[in-house]
Image (cartoon, rainbow, N blue to C red):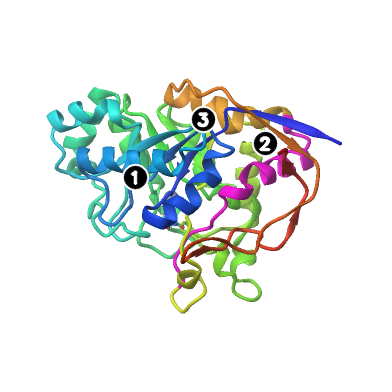
């Protein structure tokens, strides 16, 4: 049977939530990945050292069965002082910036993306060497939101050449092209954006479990993302953006945005890279690129995948919490070796 090994897999964009949901979903990342960059958009968002460290403790507790490094992040605020950031620098991997109201729990994000408004915090981050992760969407027409954000990435990248910037979960060919224009720009891409377009979400019967922000785009966008991932573009990292929501908040009127992919991420990535004859680049895409961009020394651990059918569970549950994964009930071609 065909096998493939992945060393020290890293997920550089992950939502683990809190409480029961954290206990349910955390182990589905920590059993295959050795580290992840954890998003701070809790309710309320993580903006203090106390909240950050206690969240990290809860993640460690939820993932206690595995050797796993949760790299926690702070929710960007305009009024962080240099002293505050200097004090918290060693406890965070990055700060995540959300434009206000752009996605789940981002209401207290920034209300202006004007570089001059953002300058005080960005200047401190640049001096202290704290990377900036950005959810890059405007309030424009939903299919154009990321493309319209490109000039904002450009103005931040050129105003702060020493600031490491990560364009999170890119979905467009324009974002792929921008990667090569500025030394200090990097990006993450999700599994689902390598696989689906808007057609898969809304072209037939509406698929709530594929609805996410940014929304999946056009075939030519998916091709650009896939080409960059398959060749393991050195500035592109895997970030699942696995974003679980309770089943009743997805299968309802007013569906929450987010695709839950943690339990299938490595298997489906292996299938995708094998299909395109690019398995030689998969370790760079899921680990080595992130190690270089973020200067990480990950826990050594090898995951062996086997080319054997795996039927994705229809649901994952714990107590009253229920969450539906991508490809629920479907068969995928690779499994994690027990
Ligand atoms: O689809 C999404 N879900 N996109 C985001 O930016 C946030 C995430 C979430 O937290 O649910
Ligand atoms: Zn996210």
Assess disc 2: are there few (<14), some (14-19) or many (≥20) residues with their C-alpha within 10 Å of its C-alpha: many
- What kind of element bears circle 3? loop
Q: Could you tell me which quadrant the N terminus lies in?
A: top right
What residue is shown with label 3?
235
- 131 left or right, relative to 187: left
- Disc 3 and disc 1: Cα gap in Å? 19 Å
Mark 3 C-beta closer than 8 Å to ligand 2: no
Q: Look at 53% across and 49% down and name the residue there.
A: 172
Q: Indicate whether 173 appears above or below 315.
A: above
> Farthest right residue?
1
- Disc 3 and disc 2: Cα gap in Å? 13 Å
What residue is shown with label 2?
230
Q: Quadrant of residue 84?
A: top left
- 85 left or right, relative to 171: left
Residue 178 visible? The answer is no
- Whichever of callouts 1 and 2 sits on the residue coming sooner in the sequence is 1
Residue 253 image position (x, y, % from top left): 46, 79
- What kind of element bears circle 1? helix
What residue is shown with label 1?
152
What's drawn in magenta, residue-wise? 255-279
Mark 2 C-beta closer than 8 Å to ligand 2: no
Q: Nearer the viewer, residue 197 or 9?
A: 9
- Whichever of callouts 3 and 2 sits on the residue coming sooner in the sequence is 2
- What kind of element bears circle 2? helix
Q: Look at 57% across and 63% down and name the residue there.
A: 324
């Amino acid at each position: 049977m065909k096998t493939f090994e992945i060393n020290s897999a890293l997920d550089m964009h992950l939502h683990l939530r809190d409480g029961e949901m954290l206990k349910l979903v955390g182990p589905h990342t920590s059993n295959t990945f050795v580290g992840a960059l954890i998003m701070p958009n809790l309710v309320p968002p993580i903006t203090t050292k106390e909240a950050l460290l206690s969240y990290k403790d809860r993640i460690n507790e939820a993932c206690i069965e595995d050797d796993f490094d949760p790299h926690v992040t702070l929710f960007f605020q305009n009024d962080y002082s240099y002293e505050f950031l200097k004090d918290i620098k060693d406890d965070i991997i990055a700060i995540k910036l959300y434009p206000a109201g752009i996605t789940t729990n981002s209401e207290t994000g920034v209300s202006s993306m004007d570089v001059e408004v953002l300058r005080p915090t960005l200047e401190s981050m640049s001096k202290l060497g704290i990377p900036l992760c950005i959810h890059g969407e405007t309030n424009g027409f939903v299919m154009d939101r990321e493309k319209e954000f490109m000039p904002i990435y450009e103005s931040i990248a050129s105003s702060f050449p020493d600031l490491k910037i990560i364009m999170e979960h890119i979905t467009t060919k324009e974002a792929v092209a921008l990667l090569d224009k500025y030394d200090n720009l990097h990006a993450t891409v999700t599994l689902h954006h390598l696989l689906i377009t808007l057609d898969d979400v809304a072209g037939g019967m509406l698929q709530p479990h594929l609805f996410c922000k940014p929304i999946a785009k056009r075939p030519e966008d998916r091709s650009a993302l896939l080409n960059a991932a398959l060749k393991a573009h050195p500035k592109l990292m895997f970030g699942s953006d696995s974003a679980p929501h309770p089943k009743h908040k997805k299968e309802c009127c007013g569906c929450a945005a987010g695709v839950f992919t943690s339990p299938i991420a490595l298997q489906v990535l292996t299938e995708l890279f094998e299909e395109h004859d690019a398995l030689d680049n998969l370790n760079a895409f899921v680990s080595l690129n992130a190690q270089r961009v973020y200067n990480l020394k990950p826990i050594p651990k090898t995951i062996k995948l086997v080319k054997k059918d795996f039927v994705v569970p229809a649901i994952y549950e714990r107590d009253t919490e229920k969450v539906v994964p991508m490809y629920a009930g479907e068969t995928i071609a690779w499994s994690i070796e027990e």
